[in-house]
Image (tube, rainbow, N blue to C red):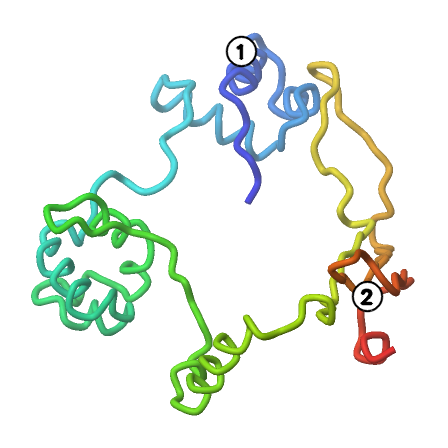
Amino acid sequence: MARAYSHDRRVRVLDAVGAGLSRRAAALRYRVGIATVIRWAAHATRTGETRAQRQGRPPGSKLDEHEAFLFALIVEKDEPKDRAATSRLPRCRSACVPSASSRSDWARCGGSSPAGQSRGKKSAHATEQDRPDVAQAREAWFAAQPDLDPERLIFIAETGLSTRMAHLRGRCARGQRLRSGIPHGHWLTTTFVAGLRLSGMSAPMVLDGPMTRDWFLA
């Protein structure tokens, strides 16, 4: 999503149009889209306002009246799935969409409350971990870790660098365009992989490209 123009630039453009400069010339002078200048000028003529209208969602939520009901669901189901939660709302099924329970509406209802509930990031894990055989194997693995010899452990570590990681922001004199050359459209990746032992690094290798199955086996 493009960043909004500053209020200062908007005022300067409108002042230039008000002083007799054409909308196209003002757009070229201040490096603004022609359609944007036309829209700004029309809004200023119609309302007399030079400040942009408020963007984003209006304050409040259509789930506010169901706050107690939603908190009960959170306690009962450990934050149920979006579609299941909205389908059980008693009076606002036609006004609510499933995604509403995963955006700011849930965040508002999941804020501070007498029950002490709060909105937080999930610690997701693979559903296979809940299978009895997988859970038993994981418990055996954790239980056997103290018996492992640290001198024999080797951890494979990988990192990389890509030319598309070039900085997209910078500083320059006010009113000037910041130009910088980057290899746009011709991305190059360099990968570094090594074994980490208790005694230090071993078998370092640099790859001219991303990690693949063949390189990993090598």
Nearer to us: label 1 or label 2 = 2
Image quarter where the N terminus lies is: top right
The quarter of the picture where residue 58 lies is top left
- Relative to 35, residue 144 above or below: below
| Viewer-proximal residue among 193 and 105 | 193
- Relative to 167, residue 144 above or below: below
Amino acid on which disc 2 is placed = Pro
Please, what secondary structure does the residue beneath circle 1 have? helix
Nearer the N terminus, badge 1 or badge 2?
1
- Identify the residue shown where x is 74% and y is 38%: 167
- Identify the residue shown where x is 42% and y is 26%: 52
Amino acid on which disc 1 is placed = Asp
Residue 88 image point, x, y percent: 14, 71
Residue 204 image point, x, y percent: 88, 61
Structural crowding at the residue carrying mark 2, measured as other residues with C-alpha within 10 Å and reported as few (<14), some (14–19) or many (≥20): some
The quarter of the picture where residue 102 lies is bottom left
Question: What numbered label is drawn on residue 210?
Answer: 2
- Identify the residue shown where x is 40% and y is 88%: 131
- Identify the residue shown where x is 56% and y is 8%: 19
Image quarter where the C terminus lies is: bottom right
| Viewer-proximal residue among 120 and 91 | 120
In the picture of the structure, the residue carrying the numbered disc 1 is: 15
Structural crowding at the residue carrying mark 1, measured as other residues with C-alpha within 10 Å and reported as few (<14), some (14–19) or many (≥20): some
Residue 159 image point, x, y percent: 76, 57
- Relative to 188, residue 13 above or below: above
Say left or right for 102 vs 158: left
| Viewer-proximal residue among 170 and 192 | 192
Say left or right for 181 vs 26: right
